[in-house]
Image (cartoon, rainbow, N blue to C red):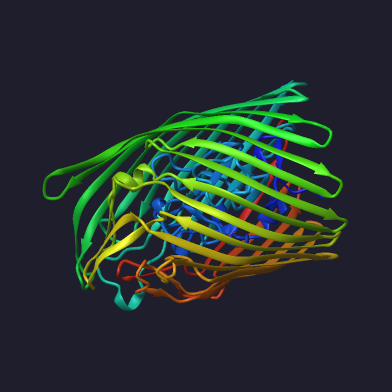
């Protein structure tokens, strides 16, 4: 019984961590246009303001694990086939880039249990992995539903000798839904929606000792943000490469380059919400250049060694055209680099781990990030414990970009310094043929936490600024249980997260309790899933002024194979059409209503 996190491609490193692995069958059980909605079944996974990426502003789509992070910036590193996909300027994640049906499996590592990862992995890491490209196939799918939803996709894989060429495409459009409750809605309010296209082209080479892929992917999306004048759009393109060679001595090299431009219009909304006026238009061109990593792995009889280095340079500017006149420009560049090593060794049932990373943040400072732990395995039982120190440097977005959400303004702060986390955790895993139980206790001490500090608050306007809070403490427990009974599969997860500033206030955007449960019927070509997600109350702000009540939503997913490579789908999210709050601006904002889609998928082989 071994638990591992895939560092890059086929390179695996043992870790004394709490890891969730979701294969394509598990992802297929959960409805959701984008991958983040399907990952919410993992304990502690959430986006800022507990909302879906379907209509949320991209800048709020950072990932929080275990309640680490009270802003839209992600404290979790997300890797797609080993390539970092966190936004180079702000750290958030564009979940529209990934097709959930074309992800072979996902690994979610909670906690900084390994020193291999650096900046952006303060709270953990998520690895997304594409299917193997070793067999010929072609597919087409379409889904349509309420709220004028239409989603179409397709792709192919064609091997020829040791090479393989593949491509995929996904497009989606929806008229969206109102994000302001009907009792306070005015003429300025419109439905929030999104249109996007996301194509990808990839070339693979698989030899006896050498493996290589070259990939390019694009994203173009347009979002209506819930009022007549507020919109944003993004154009993004990434080219990447990953090369692996060796047997005893394994070497991996990867590189990537991203270019992106984010555009946003902001407005001031009248108190009766019947009118608004443009306050400024924003353009944020950014790029990540010279991003790359080198890894060396060597396996011994009872030990493994991983060592390497990585670097990334980011340049970006926030250019605001003020109304009626004027211009505000902020931005700059960052060069971050680090070197790391990780060792694990076994002695009977005991396995020991140790790692160290030295990282330069690009702000004239550097961090040492040690990690260590141990596991003891006996039959079905695995005990684990670990301790670690991690960090996150402020993004260019936090340093230089001001933004407005409704009538809430958040100012940038060029004087931010890196935040850090010192954590300990201990857990127990019980693994049998038909069931699995994982239990973890953790404690995280955070220093210089970057959060949105309220400077003033009135019914007409809230002004906040990004600042380093003095300190915060997060304590909690997580439980993950899975059981299989013949054709039935059940799972349940729960996270308790008590995250507070040292002054006593709870960290914003973090519920104390959250959980999920679902039951799936799987037999032959039939899959039927019924599930529940629950969130406790949480605060919108650092002063704990605005309380967002807890809520629970149900979902239902049905898939049926019809024959000749054709299958049908029916998906229902928020089945009971529950209304729930996701934020204040200072006007209350609500989450997605009932959404349903019906679809068909055909898959065959190229000749």
Residue 19 visible in image = no
Q: Vertically, is 118 above or below 587?
A: above
Who's the residue at 46% across and 46% down the image?
392
Q: Position of residue 214 (x, y in %)?
A: 58, 26
Residue 555 image offset from top left, x and y in percent: 60, 68
Is residue 451 toward the left or the right of residue 43 in the image? Answer: left
Q: Looking at the image, which residue is at 38% across and 67% down?
A: 179
Foreground residue among 437 and 116: 116
Q: Residue furthest left?
A: 325
Q: Eyeballing the image, is 513 above or below 126?
A: below
Q: Is residue 247 above or below residue 41?
A: above
- Furthest residue in direction bottom, as rendered: 183
Q: Nearer the viewer, residue 297 or 584?
A: 297
Q: Position of residue 105 (x, y in %)?
A: 68, 47
Quick check: 512 left or right of 605?
A: left
Q: Residue at x 11, y 46 (%)?
A: 325
**Residue 606 visible to an observer of this rendering:** yes
**Picture quarter with the C terminus:** top right
- Report the side of 201 relative to 386 (left or right): left
Q: Please, is residue 357 above or below residue 576 in the view?
A: above
- Count of numbered labels shown in the rendering: 0
Q: Is residue 314 left or right of residue 513?
A: left
Q: Position of residue 271 (x, y in %)?
A: 20, 72
- Using the image as rendered, state which of residue 258 and residue 91 is in the foreground: 91
């Amino acid at each position: 019984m071994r638990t591992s996190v895939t560092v890059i491609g086929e390179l695996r490193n043992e870790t004394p961590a709490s890891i969730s692995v979701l294969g394509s069958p598990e992802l297929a059980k959960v409805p959701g246009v984008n991958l983040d909605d399907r990952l919410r079944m993992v304990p502690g996974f959430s986006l800022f303001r507990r909302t879906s990426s379907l209509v949320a502003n991209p800048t709020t789509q950072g990932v929080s694990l275990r309640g680490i992070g009270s802003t839209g910036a992600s404290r979790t590193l997300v890797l797609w086939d080993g390539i970092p996909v966190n936004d180079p300027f702000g750290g958030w994640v564009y979940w529209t880039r990934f097709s959930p049906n074309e992800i072979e499996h996902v690994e979610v590592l909670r906690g900084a249990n390994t020193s291999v990862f650096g900046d952006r992995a303060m709270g953990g890491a998520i690895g997304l992995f594409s299917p193997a490209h070793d067999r010929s196939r072609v597919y087409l799918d379409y889904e349509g539903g309420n709220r004028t939803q239409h989603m179409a996709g397709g792709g192919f894989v064609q091997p020829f000798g040791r090479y393989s060429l593949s491509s995929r495409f996904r497009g989606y459009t929806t008229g969206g839904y109102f994000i302001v409750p009907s009792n306070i809605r005015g003429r300025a309010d419109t439905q929030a929606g999104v249109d996007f296209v996301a194509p990808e082209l990839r070339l693979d080479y698989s030899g006896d000792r050498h493996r290589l892929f070259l990939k390019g992917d694009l994203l173009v999306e347009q979002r209506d943000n819930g009022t007549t004048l507020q919109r944003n759009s993004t154009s993004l393109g990434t080219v990447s490469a990953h090369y692996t060679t060796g047997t005893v001595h394994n070497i991996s090299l990867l590189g990537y380059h991203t270019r992106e431009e984010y555009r946003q219009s902001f407005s001031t909304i009248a108190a009766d919400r019947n009118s608004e006026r443009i306050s400024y238009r924003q353009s944020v061109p950014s790029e990540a250049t010279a991003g790359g990593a080198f890894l060396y792995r060597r396996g011994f009889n009872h030990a493994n060694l991983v060592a390497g280095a990585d670097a990334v340079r980011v340049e970006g500017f926030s250019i605001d055209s003020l109304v009626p006149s004027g211009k505000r420009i902020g931005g700059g560049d960052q060069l971050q680099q680090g070197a790391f090593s990780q060792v694990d060794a076994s002695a009977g049932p005991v396995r020991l781990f140790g790692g160290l990373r030295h990282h330069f943040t690009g702000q004239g400072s550097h961090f040492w990030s040690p990690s260590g732990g141990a596991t003891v395995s006996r039959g079905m039982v695995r005990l684990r414990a670990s301790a670690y120190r991690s960090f996150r440097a402020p993004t260019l977005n936090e340093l230089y970009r001001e933004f407005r959400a409704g009538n809430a303004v958040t100012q940038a702060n060029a004087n931010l310094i890196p935040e850090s986390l010192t954590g300990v955790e201990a857990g127990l895993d019980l693994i049998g043929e038909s069931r699995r139980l994982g239990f973890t206790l953790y404690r995280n001490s955070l220093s210089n936490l970057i959060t949105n500090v309220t400077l003033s608050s009135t019914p007409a306007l809230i002004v906040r600024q990004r600042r380093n809070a003095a300190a915060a403490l997060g304590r909690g427990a997580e439980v993950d249980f899975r059981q299989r009974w013949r054709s039935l599969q059940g799972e349940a997860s729960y996270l308790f997260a008590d995250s507070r500033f040292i002054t006593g206030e709870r960290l914003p955007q973090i519920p104390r309790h959250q959980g999920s449960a679902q039951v799936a019927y799987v037999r032959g070509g039939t899959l039927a899933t019924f599930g529940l997600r629950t969130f406790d109350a949480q605060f919108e702000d650092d002063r704990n002024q605005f309380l967002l009540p807890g809520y629970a939503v149900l979902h239902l997913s049905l898939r049926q194979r019809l024959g000749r490579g054709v299958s049908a789908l029916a998906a229902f999210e928020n089945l009971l059409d529950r209304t729930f709050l996701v934020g204040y601006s200072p006007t209350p904002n609500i989450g997605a209503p009932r959404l349903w889609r019906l679809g068909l998928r055909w898959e065959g082989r190229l000749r």
